[in-house]
Amino acid sequence: MKKEFPLTLQQLKTIYEPDWDLFVEELIPNCFCANCPGPVSIVNYTIVVNDLNDIILTGHCAVCDDSVNRYIETGEDEYYVARIQRVRKEMRK
Ligand SMILES: [Zn+2]
C-alpha cells in the first residue's frame, strides 16, 4: 500500500505551501556534496516520497555536477504527512 512514489514540482509545492519560499531558500541551497566544501545547491532534481512519507530529492551539485541527494524528514511532521496522503490519494484516482 505505502510505497515510494514520484512527485511533480507542482505536487511538492502543494505539500509545502505556505512554506514554499522556505523550502526554496533554506533546503535547496543547503545540500551536502562530497567534493565541494560547504553547502551547495541541488539542481536538476527528481522528487520521490518514500514509504515513511519522507521526501528525497535526487539531483546534481550546482558547482561540480556530481550526484547529490537531499533527504527531508517530512514523515516526522503530521502537517506534511496529511498533505502527502492527500496527494497519494489523488494519484490513485
Ligand atoms: Zn559539488
Image: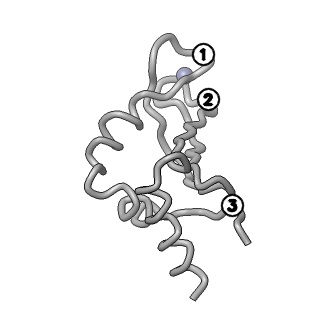
Q: Secondary structure at mark 1?
A: loop
Q: Tell me which corner region of the image, top left, top right, bottom left or bottom right, holds residue 73.
A: top right
Looking at the image, residue 64 sits to the left or right of residue 21; the answer is right
Looking at the image, residue 67 sits to the left or right of residue 20; the answer is right
The residue sitting at 73% across, 72% down in the picture is 1
The answer to whether the beta carbon of the residue marked 1 is less than 8 Å from any atom of ligand 1 is yes
Residue 41, given in percent of the width and then of the height, sits at: 43, 31
Q: CA distance from mark 1 to mark 2?
A: 8 Å
How are the colours assigned in the image? one colour
Q: Secondary structure at mark 2?
A: loop
Ligand 1 image-quadrant field:
top right
The residue sitting at 64% across, 64% down in the picture is 5
Q: What amino acid type should be assigned to the residue bearing mark 1? A: Asn
Please give the residue where the numbered disc 2 appears in the rendered image.
66
Figure check: 42 above or below 15: above
Q: Secondary structure at mark 3?
A: loop
The answer to whether the beta carbon of the residue marked 2 is less than 8 Å from any atom of ligand 1 is yes
Whether the residues at callouts 3 and 1 have beta carbons within 8 Å, the answer is no
Please give the residue where the numbered disc 3 appears in the rendered image.
4
Residue 88, given in percent of the width and then of the height, sits at: 56, 72
Please give the residue where the numbered disc 1 appears in the rendered image.
35
The answer to whether the beta carbon of the residue marked 3 is less than 8 Å from any atom of ligand 1 is no
Residue 33, given in percent of the width and then of the height, sits at: 57, 22
